[in-house]
Image (cartoon, rainbow, N blue to C red):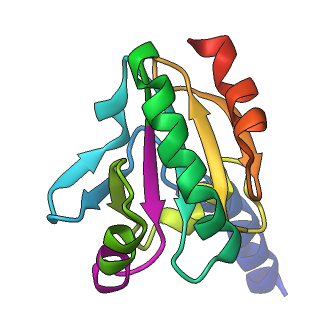
Amino acid sequence: MNTKRLFASLLLAALPLAAQAAPSLEQSRFADLNAKPVAVSAYKGKVTVLNFWATWCGPCREEMPMLNSLRKKLAPKGVEVVGVALDSKEQVEPFVKQLKIGYPILLGNDDTLDLMRGLGNKTGGLPYTLVLDRQGKVAATLTGKLDEKKLEAAVKPYL
């Protein structure tokens, strides 16, 4: 009986450690389509729209032309759009070319789903978009397909 109680206590004590094991945005590293490692911190100094997506996600595909357009429109004001794909390079590369995506695309890794959940996307649904202020801190979280008006309203306070 004591052994069971001890084991249960140890298990409960370990739970907060497991929750802390999720990667932070600052610690996260992704690869670009050339396999070059990229840290989200590389975009500090810009208001960054970080969009998590997948090739099999219909709403993700639908919002990509708007993200392209918004990037062109707001780049002079210091805004960058960055896509993080939850797919393999083999799936993403032709897709990016077909849709003529002009913003940086990074490839998610084994920790990306945990990262998204740690950043407020408890269900892991896509698309999931973060607006980061110029210091790289999360300023807004947006779940689901976005329209330009909603995204601009989330970005505007940080320009």
Q: How many marks?
A: 0
Most foreground residue, 55 or 109:
55
Nearest to the observer: residue 92 or residue 109:
92
Based on the picture, tell me whether residue 128 belongs to the magenta stretch.
no
The reply to whether residue 16 is visible in this rendering is: yes
Residue 30 location (% of width, % of height): 32, 57
Q: Residue at x 34, y 30 (%)?
A: 43
> In the image shown, does 96 or 89 lie closer to the viewer?
96
When asked about the image quadrant of residue 40, the answer is: top left
- Expressed as whole percent of the image width and height from the top left, the position of residue 117 reads 67, 59
Where is 70 relative to 121, above or below? above
Using the rendered view, name the quadrant where residue 116 is placed: bottom right
Q: Would residue 24 be visible to someone looking at this image?
A: no
User: Which residue is at 74% across, 46% downward?
Assistant: 147
**Is residue 64 toward the left or the right of residue 19 in the image?**
left
Quadrant that contains the N terminus: bottom right
Q: Nearer the viewer, residue 91 or 28?
A: 91
Q: Magenta residues, as a range?
A: 81-93
Q: Position of residue 62 (x, y in %)?
A: 65, 65
Image quadrant holding the C terminus, namely top right
Residue shown at 77%/61% (left/top)? 122
Residue at x-position 37% and y-position 23%: 44
